[in-house]
């Protein structure tokens, strides 16, 4: 179980290296938050098994009484990230799909994460806060020159705020869109400046249509541009963020170009 957790930290550090951020260390944790998620994990598996049994037993055309699913603990998605993925890289990729979680995973000021020493789905503890930046240009994801970026993401894999913004543009659940292209200040951004932040993206030279999502109320200084359609495999994508110079100490945010897997 410990080796499995170490593999998760290795996968996280590969994602951080792709973003040009230094590695993190880890410690083994058996906190109440981890225990609550493990109890939820077991209760959910039991409920799903019972639901499958009822559906199999039901006669054709007869309604099936649904099983009441357990309520997720408050720690889930906050202090603890959880994944049922079959391998560590897939678990990290699942978390990286959501800009808010990505912000916490690639934070330059993070030096430690918590992992469990017991068996089960992948767990990552983020209760220790990352040190915030004070000034300078924000981190872009994907970074300039990054390769192997997945060009397709299921809408269901995104966070609630992004799904709502996409729904307002007529993108329904079950559809596929492009990956959230994000900007991370890792510090508070005054509300007066948030409305001036813009993003333009070009795939193979053609402008990409998308929605800009401000995550600042949940994740300080986090913004994302979500393409309305998947990005073409093998294409080069250029991203240009427009940010008030006041937020950058007089500097700027350079364009980032990356290659889609």
Image: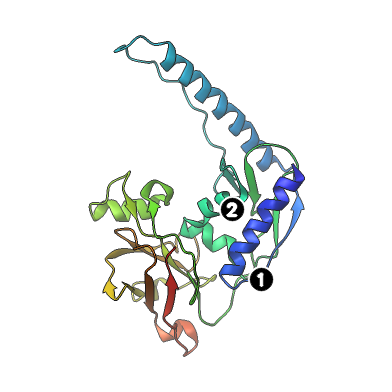
Residue 176 drawn at (x, y percent)? 33, 51
Kindly indicate the quadrant of the structure image that contains residue 13.
bottom right
Q: Residue at x 53, y 63 (%)?
A: 103
Residue holding disc 2: 89
The percent position of residue 258, horizontal first and vertical second, equals 44, 73
Task: Tell me which residue sits at (44%, 67%) in the image.
Answer: 182
Q: Which element carries disc 1, helix, strand or loop? A: loop
Which of pointers 2 and 1 lies earlier in the amino acid sequence?
A: 1
| Relative depth, front residue between 242 and 237 | 237
Tell me the number on the disc at residue 78: none
| Nearer to me, 179 or 113 | 179
Q: Residue furthest left?
A: 170
Disc 2 element? helix
Name the side, left or right, on which 161 lies relative to 104: left
The colour style of the image is rainbow
Determine which residue is flagged by label 1: 22
Of circles 2 and 1, the one toward us is: 2
Could you say where residue 170 lies in the image, as x and y percent from the top left? 23, 52
Residue in the image at 62% along x and 50% along y: 88
How many numbered marks, from 0 up? 2
């Amino acid at each position: 179980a410990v080796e499995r957790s170490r593999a998760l930290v290795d996968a996280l550090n590969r994602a951080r290296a792709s973003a040009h951020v230094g590695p993190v260390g880890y410690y083994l944790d058996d906190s109440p938050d981890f225990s609550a998620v493990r109890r939820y994990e077991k209760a959910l598996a039991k409920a799903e098994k019972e639901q499958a049994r009822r559906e199999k037993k039901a006669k054709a055309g007869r309604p099936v009484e649904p099983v009441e699913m357990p309520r997720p603990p408050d720690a889930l998605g906050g202090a603890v990230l959880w994944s049922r993925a079959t391998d560590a890289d897939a678990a990290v990729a699942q978390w990286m799909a959501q800009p808010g979680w990505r912000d916490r995973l690639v934070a330059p000021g993070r030096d430690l994460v918590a992992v469990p020493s017991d068996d089960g789905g992948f767990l990552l503890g983020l209760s220790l806060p990352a040190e915030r930046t004070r000034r300078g240009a924000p981190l872009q994801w994907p970074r300039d020159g990054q390769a192997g970026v997945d060009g397709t993401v299921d809408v269901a894999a995104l966070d609630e705020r992004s799904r709502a913004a996409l729904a307002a543009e007529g993108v329904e659940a079950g559809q596929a869109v492009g990956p959230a292209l994000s900007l991370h200040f890792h510090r508070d951004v005054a509300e007066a400046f948030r409305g001036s932040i813009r993003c333009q993206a070009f795939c193979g030279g053609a402008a990409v249509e998308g929605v800009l999502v401000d995550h600042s109320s949940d994740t300080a200084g986090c913004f994302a541009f979500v393409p309305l359609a998947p990005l073409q495999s093998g294409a080069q994508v250029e991203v240009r963020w427009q940010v008030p110079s006041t937020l950058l100490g007089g500097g700027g945010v350079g364009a980032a170009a990356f290659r889609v897997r």
